[in-house]
Image: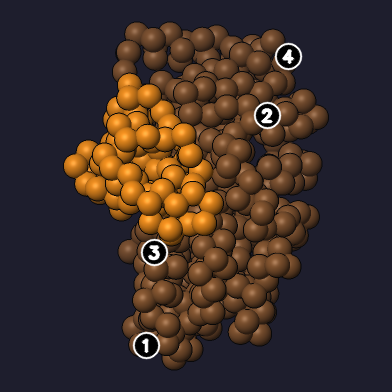
Chain colours: A orange, B brown
Amino acid sequence: MCLAVPGKIVDIAGSGDDPLNGRVATVDMQGSRVEASLAMTPEADAGDWVLVHAGFALTVIDEREAKETWEALQIALGDDSPPAASSEDA
Amino acid sequence: MDRAAIRRMVEEIETILAARDSIRIMEVCGTHTVSLFRSGIKSMLPPGLKLISGPGCPVCVTSQGYLDVACELAARPDVTVCTYGDMVRVPGRNGSLADQRGRGAEVIVVYSARDALKHAEEHPDRKTVFLAVGFETTTPATAAVILAAEAKGLENFFILPAHKLVIPAMTALVSGGDVPLDGFLCPGHVSVVIGADVYRPIAEGFGKPCVVAGFEPRQMLEGILGIARQLAEGRAQVENVYGVAVTGEGNRPARELIGKVFTPADAVWRAMGTIPESGLDLRPEYKRFDAFDRFGVEQGPDVCPAGCLCGEVIQGKAAPSDCALFGAACSPLSPVGPCMVSSEGACSAWYKYHRKA
């Protein structure tokens, strides 16, 4: 349930998509890029690692933890269900 | 992964088990269920250590009646249903959303609630209904898009609310007493939002050790060992082995988003019936986004498919292999119930990793 996937913020833009915090980040997840709202992580900055769930950054984590989590997800989900697809899970 | 450390942890669990008949731990989270299988931890543990899958797969706990309403709305010519992927193939009374799509309905799989909002903005001639399912990890996203829709004055965006709360479901399970449980392996990413402190009433009030863990194999094993140690020492507390992502109070902005838009309400869980204050309704000021109200539809009865034990499986009352349909009439290619549809459902995980074990 509620799987979040780690990625690194490569760019931040204001988009006005959400009224509380208009910042939306471009997050690199091992090569694939997704947009993530920073409404829940106002402290996040470019270069930070975050856990992303359903288009929102849930929390800022350190790089080592991000890499460990990524490896764990590879084991957990494997090739038949890469993290990018698993984010369809609620 | 440090194999020697893993072996030491397994040995300590064996030592603790030697003094007891069994230890029954519920892993609440569907991703834990899958990760425990795939990492090999489940097969490493001694037989007396029972891992029981809990109600932590959002698709699995969603009632049949909700799905039927979603299909009914999808069948309307002016409605587009946007949904997370796993909901699409769950069979309802008159087929699944995928079947509706085959009949010409517009059902779109989205990665984020933000995509559903975007669809509404780009298609002002259609009414976009987002299926708002999921636990506290997912709910803040729905709340944020409701606030955005309000700010933008959108008239064609709605949600079909069915968000659930983890703590009331766990409380219902332990207070029901039907399922003997010794402790809980608590979900990692739900806890990022709700924090570790909220498990204290379950640990301290019901005497069930609660350990919050992430999804790394070592961490899940640390969580299981933590519960076993507490049992051996006669303690029942909240521990958090996922401190890098989970704090005591959780993510405050995320919880504030939920509180601003939603209010706790009784909710129907598949086969579990209505659990008091276990779901979320839109607050009155945002009620105009409620698809139930807007389209005048009601959630029908929660009638499970004949013979399907999904309702028992999500409560830990039955293992997937106890179901007569499992692996025969029900498989991932032709699922009867949601636990076989969802990639994080217990039946799907058992089918993939445990059938031959």
> The disc labelled 1 sits on which kind of residue?
Arg
Disc 1 marks which residue? B103
Residues flagged by tags 4 and 2 on a common chain:
yes
Point 73% across, 33% down: residue = B202
Label 4 close to label 2 by CB (< 8 Å):
no
Label 3 close to label 2 by CB (< 8 Å):
no
Q: CA distance from mark 3 to mark 1?
A: 24 Å
Q: Nearer the viewer, residue B346 or B213?
A: B213
Residues flagged by tags 3 and 1 on a common chain:
yes
Residues flagged by tags 4 and 1 on a common chain:
yes
Residue B3 position within the rendered picture, expressed as x and y whole percent measured from the top left:
32, 13
Badge nearest the viewer, 3 or 1: 3
Residue B234 bears which disc, if any?
4
Q: Earlier in the sequence, mark 1 or mark 2?
A: 1
Q: CA distance from mark 3 to mark 4?
A: 49 Å
Q: Nearer the viewer, residue B143 or B97?
A: B143
Is residue B210 visible in this depiction of the protein? no
Q: Earlier in the sequence, mark 3 or mark 2?
A: 3
Q: Secondary structure at mark 3?
A: helix
Disc 3 marks which residue? B115
Is residue B108 visible in this depiction of the protein? yes
Residue A16 position within the rendered picture, expressed as x and y whole percent measured from the top left:
43, 58
Q: Residue furthest left?
A: A31
Label 1 close to label 2 by CB (< 8 Å):
no
Q: Earlier in the sequence, mark 4 or mark 2?
A: 2
Q: Nearer the viewer, residue B165 or B3?
A: B165
Point 52% across, 56% down: residue = A19
Disc 2 marks which residue? B197
Position of the C terminus of chain B by quadrant: top left
